[in-house]
Image (tube, grey):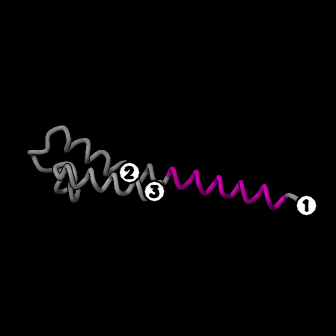
């Protein structure tokens, strides 16, 4: 439920502000982007690392959680 709401909010922001919804790093490299261009490019570069970090913690937590239930007699 929360994930769906977050997706809808993000889509609405992307539609409302097409200047920051850049298609790719090549498009983000245009000269008319200003500071927003740098911010968007930085987000596009760092986002995969943030997702990997969150997934790593979720997987480790799920593994520890399942180990706890397997040890109960």
Quadrant in the rendering for residue 32: top left
SS at badge 2: helix
Reply above or below: 71 against 40. below
Task: Residue at 25%, 46% (x, y): give it.
Answer: 40
Q: Position of residue 70 (x, y in %)?
A: 81, 61
Task: Residue at 13%, 44% (x, y): give it.
Answer: 33
Task: State the predominant SS element of the stretch in magenta.
Answer: helix
Question: Which residue has dot 3 on it?
Answer: 3
Residue 58 on the magenta span: yes
Residue stretch in magenta: 53-71
- Near mark 2 (Cα within 10 A), the count class, few <14, some 14-19 or many ≥20, is few
Mark 2 or mark 1: which comes first in sequence? 2
Q: CA distance from mark 2 to mark 1?
A: 42 Å
Which quadrant: the C terminus? Answer: bottom right
- Near mark 1 (Cα within 10 A), the count class, few <14, some 14-19 or many ≥20, is few
SS at badge 1: loop
Question: Which residue has dot 2 on it?
Answer: 47
Between marks 2 and 3 in the image, the one whose residue lies nearer the viewer: 3
Question: Which residue has dot 1 on it?
Answer: 73
Q: CA distance from mark 3 to mark 1?
A: 36 Å
Between marks 3 and 1 in the image, the one whose residue lies nearer the viewer: 3
Which residue is situated farthest in the right direction here?
73
Quadrant in the rendering for residue 58: bottom right
């Amino acid at each position: 439920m929360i994930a769906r709401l977050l997706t809808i909010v993000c889509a609405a922001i992307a539609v409302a502000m097409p200047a920051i919804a850049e298609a790719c790093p090549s498009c983000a490299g245009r000269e008319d982007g200003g500071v927003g261009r740098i911010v968007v490019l930085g987000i596009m570069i760092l986002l995969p690392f943030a997702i990997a970090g969150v997934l790593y913690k979720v997987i480790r937590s799920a593994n520890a959680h399942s180990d706890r239930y397997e040890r109960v007699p």
